[in-house]
Image: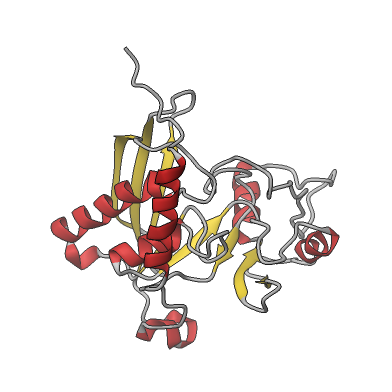
């Protein structure tokens, strides 16, 4: 018999999750705490990690939790682990960490035990950080629990604090002409909640030979057709694989 899919938790559980988010959010540090962060070109950065939980298509219980550590700037794989896991919590918008973070914390702890010299100096997390309805997405959650600087790398724009996927936002995206160019995502409060870039989209399209959306011939500028996001029920870490929003790190 197939494992039963996790059911939506009762409101009492969601309230407890909110309280836990608020408790841990107080421990987030949004400033440079590591020496390499203040060095030109991050010259002291040697190891970069990436984590992700990928659901098995058509299966609401099984998923693959992965941790990869790369050398920097060479980007050679130093460590890699992937494990099948059984999800015990459903996806609820705004609470992705309670579904995925335990598996990612376990992966980081196993690395610490097996090869502490390969521990990453920063983790890139498939999900949101401070750009989140509670200001505390899965990247912040993981940063607090692992005591590692974490950067949320989301695939769609959460429309919070006045951020909108409107004509102005789309125009800013279209003005990005080369890999590495960015623009800040500034909320209505005046806080910088993240940055958007085109490097990953451009690399994927070039590697896979995908056409640039809206163009009949290859051009130097990668464009995209943005998708609505605020009312979507997709997990924070899922969506358009060619769209990336890199967020402000969530650190402890």
Farthest residue in the top direction?
A: 1
- The residue at the point 57 percent across, 59 percent down is 133
Q: Is residue 7 visible?
A: yes
Q: Residue at 29% across / 64% down in the picture?
A: 146
**How far from the left and from the top, in percent, is residue 166?**
81, 58
- Scheme of colours in the image: secondary structure
Where residue 76 appears, x then y in whole percent?
36, 59
Q: Quadrant of the N terminus?
A: top left
Vertical order, 107 against 26 (above or below): above
Residue 214 as seen in the image, left or right of residue 130: right
- Which of these two is toward me, 47 or 220? 47
Of the 4 image quadrants, the one containing the C terminus is bottom left
The image quadrant of residue 131 is bottom right
Most foreground residue, 40 or 245: 245
Query: Residue 127's spot in the image, x, y percent?
Result: 50, 54
Position above or below: 65 against 105: above
At 44% from the left and 47% from the top, the residue drawn is 14
Provide residue 120's location: percent of width, then percent of height.
31, 66
Classify residue 69 by image quadrant: bottom left
Is 50 in front, or is 15? Answer: 15
Q: In the picture shown, does residue 181 fall above or below 21? A: below
Q: Splitting the image into 4 quarters, where does residue 44 fall?
A: bottom left
Most extreme residue toward the front, as rendered? 12
Please state the total of marks drawn on the protein image: 0
Q: Is residue 251 left or right of residue 230?
A: left
Residue at the (61%, 56%) spot, across then down = 244
Q: Would you say 183 lies left or right of 250 here?
A: right
Residue 49 visible in this rendered orientation of the protein: no
């Amino acid at each position: 018999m197939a494992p039963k899919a996790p059911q939506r938790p009762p409101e009492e559980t969601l309230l407890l999750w909110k309280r836990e988010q608020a408790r841990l959010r107080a421990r987030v540090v949004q400033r440079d705490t590591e020496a390499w962060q203040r060095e030109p070109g991050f010259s002291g950065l040697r190891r970069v990690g990436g984590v992700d939980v990928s659901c098995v298509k058509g299966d609401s219980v099984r998923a693959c939790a992965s941790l990869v550590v790369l050398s920097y700037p060479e980007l050679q794989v130093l460590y890699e682990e992937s494990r099948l896991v059984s999800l015990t919590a459903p996806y609820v918008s705004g609470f992705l960490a309670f579904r995925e973070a335990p598996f990612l914390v376990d992966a980081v702890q196993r690395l610490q035990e097996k090869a502490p010299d390969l521990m990453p100096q920063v983790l890139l997390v498939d999900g949101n950080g401070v750009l989140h309805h509670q200001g505390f997405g899965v990247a912040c959650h993981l940063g607090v629990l692992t005591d590692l600087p974490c950067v949320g790398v989301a695939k769609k724009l959460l429309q919070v604090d006045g951020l909108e996927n409107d004509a102005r936002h789309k125009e800013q995206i279209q003005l990005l002409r080369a890999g590495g160019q960015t623009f800040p995502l500034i909320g209505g409060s005046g806080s910088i909640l993240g940055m958007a870039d085109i490097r990953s989209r451009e690399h994927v399209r070039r590697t896979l030979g995908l056409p640039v959306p809206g163009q009949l011939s290859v051009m130097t500028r990668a464009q995209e057709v943005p998708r609505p996001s605020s009312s979507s029920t997709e997990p924070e870490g899922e969506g358009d694989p060619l769209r990336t929003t890199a967020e402000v790190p969530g650190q402890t």
